Image (tube, coloured by chain):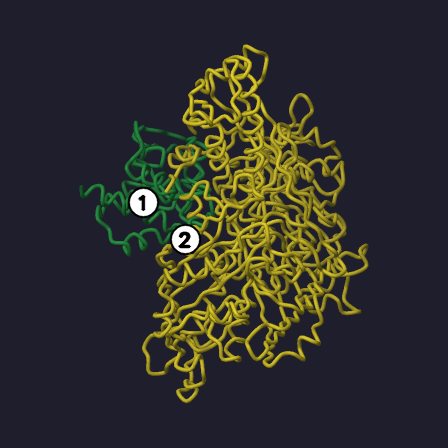
Chain colours: A green, B yellow
Amino acid sequence: MRQVTITLNGESRSCLVKPNETLLDVLRDKLGVKSPKCGCDHGDCGSCAVLLNGKSVRSCLIFAIECEGMEIRTLEGVSGDKLSALQEAFIEFNSFQCGYCAPGVIITATELLETNPHPSLDEIKEALSGNLCRCTGYTPIFDAIMAVTKKEDE
Amino acid sequence: MKYAWRNDAFAKVTGRARYADDIKMPGLCHAVPVYADAVHARLLRIDPEAAGKSPGVLGVFTAADIPGTVKFGQIIRDCPTLAGDKIRCHGDVIALVVAETRAQAMVAGDLVKCEIEDLPALTDPEQALAPDAILIHAELGTNLVNEHSVRRGDVSAGETASEYIIAAEVTTSRIEHSYLEPEAAVALVRPDGVVEIHGSMQHPFSTRRFVASTLGLPLAQVEVTGTPMGGGFGGKDDTAALVCARAALCAWLLKRPVKITYTREWSMRESYKRHPYRMRYRMGLDAEGRIRFVYVDMLADGGAYCSVSPWVTWRSTVQCCGAYEVPNVHCDVRAVYTNNVFCGAMRGFGSPQVNFAIEQLIEIAGQKAGLDEITIRRRNMLQQDSVTVTGQQLSGHTVSLRQVMDRVLAEIDYVNKRQNCSFGDPEAEEWYGIGFAISYRGMSLGAEGTDFNSAIISIQPDGSVILETGIHENGQGSESAMILLAAEHLGIDKNRIVYRRSSTSTIPDGGTTVASRGTLMGGGAVVDACHIIQDKIGAIIRRKLAVDPAHLLFREGFIYDEASARRLCSFNEAIGWCYQMQEYPYAFGVFKAPQVSWDEHTGQGNAYFTWVYGCQAVELKVVPKTGQVVLLNMVAAHDIGNAVNPAMLSGQFYGGMAMGTGYALFEEFRHQDGKGISSNFHNYRIPRATDLPPMTAIIVENPDPLSPSGAKGIGEPTNELMAPAIANALYRATGKRYLKQPIQPDRRGAFPQRPKENLSTPELGDGSLPESDSTDRIKED
């Protein structure tokens, strides 16, 4: 076991981890952050996406021990006092159903909009190509992201 | 347009929604399943010793530890919670290991040893009924799970009357539901002795039966509560219930709360799939292109356990001829046991298979008779008061098949775009194709089973409302639909209503949330409960105000005399009066499905009390050299009766079209000799964001008189048409028919080019549709 200290959603957090514990397991089981979900544990589905130093990563593919001193944002940290424009749009456009993929999808889309505020539809699709959703057919997700892009234009 | 609204929206976009695996509690320990690497074997001995000594292990349990009944099943009790003396498929669980942590349980799980004696594996459904076939369940004396038939008219007379006859064999694959959340359950034994289950399952009541049977407890001593569910699509029934029963078993034996969370690999290995079908069809048309007969023989691979195979295959018989009038029908369907992973319910439930066949065959037959794909459908499609292949007259609701088809064809500009189809033109760099498919679908359970549901409305002294129903939120938004219906009928703001997620102990068994019956059945019960409340409030108002209005109108928080439009009081005032005058504003509403009927011998009867009509179309292009299929556009129309929550309804359309796309083009649970090759999303591909084109949802509303809310169902209709629509579009792109699902380019990695000289064969002459619409001629028919 080794002590790891990270900045999690703006707070400094420490815990003891084994070298083979994934960031996903540590977030969920040791730090009580439940929004990243385990859908495949192989980096294929994107349900566990978190922002690591601002870049989206699959938390099931990263060892917690590698994250010493890094900044991690999960869906819990995306909304502060109020919902982000993207979260609002997700509600407005019904961009989720079962909601299991939503944390990963919103994290991925948040990163997209932070790095490219005006993505084309193809860029949105490309950005989300690693996030599986079985319920929505993706269309309402594209619609929500496009709507946020347009709102920012105004 | 009404609005996109769901009661769980905030929880789900902020990550606060608490799914089964998110549940934590003091003393929680973790169980994992143990499998044997066998497909069919005698299980001689299980050695738990090494596992039991592993750090953190609290117990290793086998079938011998089950206090109740080892085997359970919804129809045939053939499925063991833990395999006892025999392994029947690769997904059979032989033991459970419980430890303080999941990691410890997993380490110990690998240490459980077993001694087995392999038996010959029966993995080919065609051989299941051979006289010398090994029996999967010796006690049943046969590998036949069930058979159904439909006999209508005289097929040989139909054959004589036919000018054109086609025959084809169509096959479909075993596919995986691919809910994003693998199975998970938490079980605990309460101080009062009740076993409490929180799990990701579609069917709390069905789960309760599994759990009670496994533990040998009365139903009342098991309380099952659903949690937000990460997708189901029909797939979180038997397997999810088994996972709950196993968690309950461990909790019961250890007297500690136990969680089981499946890995994707366990889920894919063990969970039931959509049935693969082999369908042999013969169809005859007379000189005018009217279907004179259909002969069909279907074989469904049920895998190792019965699950709901009899019900799935029953729907296949009822819908075996698609949405067409056929006077002479001979249909047989059999489901058989094999040593493959078992098959059960999946969104569509026996219709995606037959639609994949019939919606291509109708075009092939039409072409033989010189009729294009629109004309042949219009000439044969079910209309108002038509009689179905099971002898049911379609009356009492609007038969809108023609309406939905015309809406889709107009929206996608079918007739014009049809002229651009490539039909495998060897000169072209890219091939373009357009196609569509239509269906009718029986709503709810039909003659499969008893069909009723209930709702409880309890209005609090301040006028806020607690609502619950016997319908389960599977992620589809059923709770929101129920709230909207109650808000509309009570004339109050939806935000005044809180949906209480019911448990099996708070509301009577309302059956399972399947068969697209949520809004129809639960909504019917909500409307009934609202009527009871309205009557109670009406009586109170009459007493309090000494007025006698014939009808009350509940609108925007006030209650009016409908005739004079006079405002009588506010909703909250009326509720206050109820409490003052010792009348609880509480109602238990029930909706009982109208009578249906079925004769198992002839396969005739009023199979379903109402039907949904749908049409989906697709445009695509094919790159001949690589075999790449690029989807360009999709349009769907379904007659939903009454759209309670249109945005969520459209969501069902998009999701169904996407799932149908996966079925058409790449989904297949691959296995060899009964052992799964597909194990996770890297080797089982479902549609990704980059696979899908723009989609249009057209909501058609012909309110259903037999549904108290006017609404019908939508979950499954949307998922039974895109595969044949894509197959038909691919035909018009490549000039080839694809009767095997999933449709894959041939081994050379490309679609074969058609020789140029064949291009002149009449796919409707030059590939264009007749200018004039054939409606008038049909009317003469």
Q: In this view, does B388 lie above or below B448?
A: below
The quadrant of the image that shows the C terminus of chain B is bottom right
The quadrant of the image that shows the N terminus of chain B is top left
Q: Residue B698 carries which label?
A: 2
Residue A126 located left or right of residue B215: left
Camera-nearest residue between B585 and B480: B585
Q: Which residue lies furthest to the top in this view?
A: B580
Q: Mark 2 lies on which chain?
A: B
| Snapshot quadrant of residue B757 | bottom left
Percent x, y of residue B274: 58, 57
Percent x, y of residue B340: 65, 59
Query: Looking at numbered disc 2 in the image, what kind of residue is underneath it?
Result: Ile
Residue at 30% over, 37% down = A70
Q: Which residue lies furthest to the left in this view?
A: A154
Q: Which chain carries label 1?
A: A
Residue B688 located left or right of residue B104: left
Query: Looking at numbered disc 1 in the image, what kind of residue is underneath it?
Result: Ala
Camera-nearest residue between B14 and B154: B154
Q: In this view, does A39 lie above or below B777?
A: above
Observer able to see residue B614: yes
Residue B770 located left or right of residue B120: left
Q: Distance between the residues labelled 1 and 2?
A: 20 Å
Percent x, y of residue B553: 47, 27
Callout 1: SS: helix
Mark 2 is surrounded, within 10 Å at the Cα level, by few (under 14), some (14 to 19) or many (20 or more) other residues, namely many
For label 1, the residue is: A144
Mark 1 is surrounded, within 10 Å at the Cα level, by few (under 14), some (14 to 19) or many (20 or more) other residues, namely many
Q: Residue B418 carries which label?
A: none
Observer able to see residue B100: no
Mark nearer the viewer, 1 or 2:
2
